[in-house]
Amino acid sequence: MGTALVDTCDEHPEAEVPFSCRSASCGTCRVRVKEGMALLSKPQDDELDVLEVFGDGKDVRLCCQINVVGEGKITLEVVEPE
């Protein structure tokens, strides 16, 4: 299944990804995947439902739902709340 990105962010607070619910219901931890999408797990229905509410593009994911499933460079950018 891979490494949960939320765990990695917990170990590296300098990543500055905001987390609230950690269960794909609030959208606080939305990140834009700038590089490395193929290295991440595919979004599941719960995550897609939340992202649809925000109207984000296919390059945005919920950090709390991502598992890293491959090796290579991954670049993420926190989506600032509007």
Image (cartoon, rainbow, N blue to C red):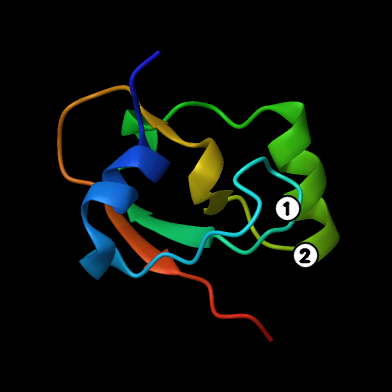
In this picture, is 17 found above or below 33? Answer: below
> 60 or 29, which is in the foreground?
29
What is the spatial separation of the Cα atoms under label 1 and label 2, in whole angstroms? 5 Å
| Residue under the point 68% across and 59% down | 27
Amino acid type at mark 1: Leu
Which residue is disc 1 drawn over? 51
For the residues labelled 1 and 2, say whether their Cβ atoms are less than 8 Å apart: yes
Where the C terminus falls, by quadrant? Answer: bottom right
Image position of 34 (left or right of 23): left
Image position of 40 (left or right of 28): left
Q: Position of residue 16 (x, y in %)?
A: 34, 70
Which residue is disc 2 drawn over? 54
| Residue under the point 46% across and 26% down | 41
Query: Which image quadrant is residue 57 in?
Result: bottom right
Image position of 24 (left or right of 10): right
10 Å crowding of disc 2: few (<14), some (14-19), many (20+): few
Outermost residue to the left? 72
10 Å crowding of disc 1: few (<14), some (14-19), many (20+): many
| Residue under the point 52% across and 44% down | 64
| Residue under the point 59% across and 46% down | 22
Where the N terminus falls, by quadrant? Answer: top left
For mark 2, give the secondary structure: helix
Q: Position of residue 18 (x, y in %)?
A: 49, 66
Amino acid type at mark 2: Phe
> 28 or 49, which is in the foreground?
28
Image position of 68 (left or right of 48): left
Name the disc covering residue 15, or none.
Answer: none
Marks counted in the figure total 2
